[in-house]
Amino acid sequence: MLQLHNYWRSTSSYRARLLLTVKGLPYDYVPVNIKEHEQHGEAYRRISPNGFVPTLVDGDLVVGQTVNIAEYLDETYPDNPLFPRDPAGKVRVRGFVNSCIGDVQPRTQKRVREYIDERFSRDVLIEWYQFWSAEGLSILENLAVQDRPDGAFLHGGAPGAGDCFLVAQLYNWRRRDVDLSAAPTLLSIESACLDLPAFIAAAPENQPDVGQDDRY
Ligand SMILES: N[C@@H](CCC(=O)N[C@@H](CS)C(=O)NCC(=O)O)C(=O)O
């Protein structure tokens, strides 16, 4: 059985859960409480030396990094593909997910927020978060519009890796009141996703470790 070490409210964990549920793969949920800094504990560092969630474990294989998880799952479990099979489509969706994890999320990830909050102030953190979130929103909207094929989702008529990454990122922005109105394409893709059983199953509020969390 696949195991996912993750935290209910983490954006990266949410996208990994979505990858699994969109693929229709059952998994064991192993909570890692990053609010209590369990990601830095000795036990978790044995599977994730850099202390990031999520980590997927498949038998003896340990897979970190959500793009890596997406590609591993698609190569190993071919049903319900996460990436288009044609080169142009694959390049487009890979470009989108790499932008999520490379251009957008790292600027506001937990350890960056904590550093700014502790070193400067909550006000600086809020300004930082809102500025880079607006920038990230614009990056993803531009990518979603470019060469988008017909269909309700990011790339056609079925959800794939890009939709998983997008829905998790929008959740992150929405919970901190980012103005999303400049991204109508992203919002329409999100609304096509959110009622699907795979997206309901992976939603943060439906996870076994759901609890209270700080806003920032
Ligand atoms: N590039 C990584 C990012 C992972 C990541 O940023 N995880 C966050 C939670 S969303 C985390 O573990 N933060 C804990 C920390 O920064 O100490 C991926 O895509 O898996």
Image (cartoon, rainbow, N blue to C red):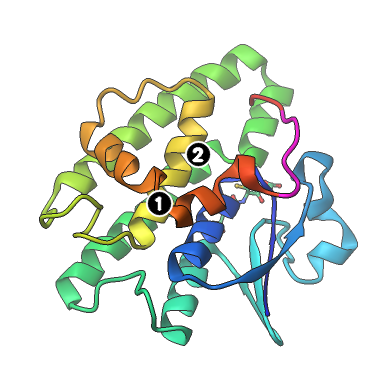
Pick the quarter of the image with the N terminus: bottom right
User: What segment is highlighted magenta in the picture?
Assistant: 208-213
Q: CA distance from mark 1 to mark 2?
A: 30 Å
Residue at the top extreme? 123
Pick the quarter of the image with the C terminus: top right
Asked whether, in this view, residue 193 is left or right of residue 50, the answer is: left
Asked whether, in this view, residue 68 is left or right of residue 208, the answer is: left
What kind of secondary structure does the magenta stretch mostly adopt?
loop
What's the mark number on residue 165? none
Which amino acid type is marked by label 1? Leu
Label 2: few (<14), some (14–19) or many (≥20) C-alpha neighbours in 10 Å: some
Q: Nearer the viewer, residue 188 or 116?
A: 188
3 over 100 or under it: above or below: below
Residue 200 at what x, y percent from top left?
50, 48
Residue 126 at what x, y percent from top left?
55, 18
Note whether ligand 1 is within 8 Å of mark 2. no
Asked whether, in this view, residue 148 is left or right of residue 178, the answer is: left
Residue 61 at what x, y percent from top left?
66, 84
81 over 130 or under it: above or below: below
Residue at the spot 75% in from the left edge and 30% down from the top edge: 212
- Residue that carries the numbered disc 1 in the rendered image: 196
* Residue 110: quadrant of the picture: top right
Residue at the spot 31% in from the left edge and 55% down from the top edge: 96
Asked whether, in this view, residue 92 is left or right of residue 110, the answer is: left
74 over 35 or under it: above or below: below
- Residue that carries the numbered disc 2 in the rendered image: 107
Q: Secondary structure at mark 1?
A: loop
Q: Secondary structure at mark 2?
A: helix
Label 1: few (<14), some (14–19) or many (≥20) C-alpha neighbours in 10 Å: few
